[in-house]
Image: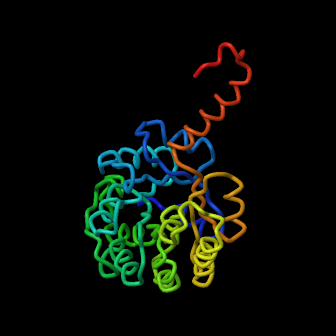
Amino acid sequence: MRDNPLKARLARGETVFGTFAFEFDSPGLARIVRSTGCEFLILDMEHSGWSFETVKDQIQFARGAGLVPLVNPPGDDFNLITRSLDLGAKGILVPVVESKAQAEAIVRATRYPPHGRRGSAFGVAHDDYIIGDARKTMKAANAGALVMVKIETRKGVANVDEIMSVPGIDVAFVGHTDLSVSLQKPLEFEHAEFVKARDAVAAACKRHGKVAGNLVGNPQWGKEWIRKGFRMIAYMGDIWLLQSALQAGIEAMRPAVPKARRGR
């Protein structure tokens, strides 16, 4: 059973960087991401429409590239969590977590009995198709699963201290867009109410010895959140990275075009 170097680095107090994938189902995606220095890739199923077949391929590409694959399932259903892990994901990012009871159920789905209720399948993708000592495999899987919960609603923030008190929850990941909408301040990430909510998540993580994470849209934003205590940083996603780089390049070249030939 492979270990989880990402979880080990976070446990040592380090800051880790990665990105999201929503759109580009390419065999080379993971290697491209790894070449940038990223340590993890979050495969989104919540907003992408990707199937488990697609995600399974991308998990294997990531594992081959030395990149830690994580899955953002479309909900907290038991089968969504356990299937993601059985396909080889080293962690899950569960959306819209709002209570201690919900967090406890999520942890149970990631653990084998007697510590949880994860279904047992050995010699499949998660253990590299090698049937070894089942007890050792289960112990390693329980220890290695990175369990991340999205705090992205007013209710989630109100209960974040109880949520992060749950043993087995490793990361509180701020779903910044949804949180701003829940606070009725859509995309107003500098608004005092949003900043207060963000800081409440970071404070709860610090109190309970857990990790605060988020997705950032630019380096300046990332630096600010790191200063506030966030240590798991996802920089943009495949759609926006391509879009922003392409747009910046074209806009930089347009002034060189003679006025009579510019057009659109």
Depth check, front residue: 85 or 131? 85
Q: Which residue is drawn at 40% across and 67% down?
A: 141
Is 80 positioned to the left or the right of 214 in the image?
A: left
Residue 233 against residue 100 in the figure, above or below? above
Q: In the picture, which quadrant includes the C terminus?
A: top right
Q: In the picture provided, is 205 more to the left or to the right than 255? A: left
Which residue is located at x 35 percent, y 57 percent?
126
- Residue 25 picture location, percent across and down: 40, 39
The residue sitting at 40% across, 78% down in the picture is: 103
Q: In which quarter of the image is the N terminus?
A: bottom left
In depth, the one of 218 and 34 nearer the eye is 218
Residue 236 x/y as whole percent: 57, 50
Q: Which residue is drawn at 60% across and 40% down?
A: 244
Quarter assignment of residue 91: bottom left
- In this rendering, the answer to whether 167 lies above or below 21 is below
Query: Is residue 171 visible in this depiction of the protein?
Result: no
Which colouring convention does the figure follow?
A: rainbow
